[in-house]
Image (cartoon, rainbow, N blue to C red):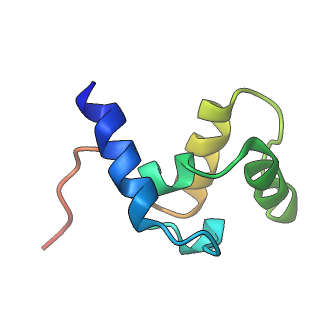
Amino acid sequence: MGKFKELLQEKRRTPKESTVEAATTIAQVALFSIVQLKEYCREHDLPQSGSKLQLVQWVSVHLKLPEAGASPDI
């Protein structure tokens, strides 16, 4: 249940006009709709089929976002 609350809090912090490219965390990428994620994938020649989880993973890798729980390089 903690992860769900974290995603809700993240959603409240994410402006509605934000773009996929502006996402800085995987949680922010996950807030976009499947349509928005597929559009991003289409624009960047990424796979467009699969579940939302797969789309989030492809977009996150493409944006070079840190994995959940990974500590940033100092």
Quarter occupied by the N terminus: top left
| Residue 39 horizontal/vertical position (percent) | 84, 57
Quarter occupied by the C terminus: bottom left
* Residue found at x 79% / y 63%: 44
Q: Quadrant of residue 47?
A: top right
- Comparing 36 with 45, the one in front is 36
- Comparing 49 with 14, the one in front is 14
Q: Is residue 22 above or below residue 44?
A: below
| Residue 4 visible within the image | yes
Q: Residue furthest front?
A: 12
Q: Quadrant of residue 52?
A: top right
Left or right: 70 as drawn, with respect to 29? left
| Residue 33 horizontal/vertical position (percent) | 71, 47
| Residue 25 visible within the image | no
Q: Quadrant of residue 48?
A: top right
Q: Is residue 30 above or below residue 13?
A: above
Left or right: 34 as drawn, with respect to 27? right
| Residue 6 horizontal/vertical position (percent) | 30, 44
- Comparing 33 with 64, the one in front is 33
| Residue 12 horizontal/vertical position (percent) | 42, 60
* Residue found at x 23% / y 31%: 2
* Residue found at x 75% / y 42%: 34
Q: Is residue 52 above or below residue 35?
A: above
Left or right: 44 as drawn, with respect to 59? right
Left or right: 54 as drawn, with respect to 30? right
- Comparing 69 with 31, the one in front is 31
Q: Residue furthest left?
A: 74
Figure label count: 0
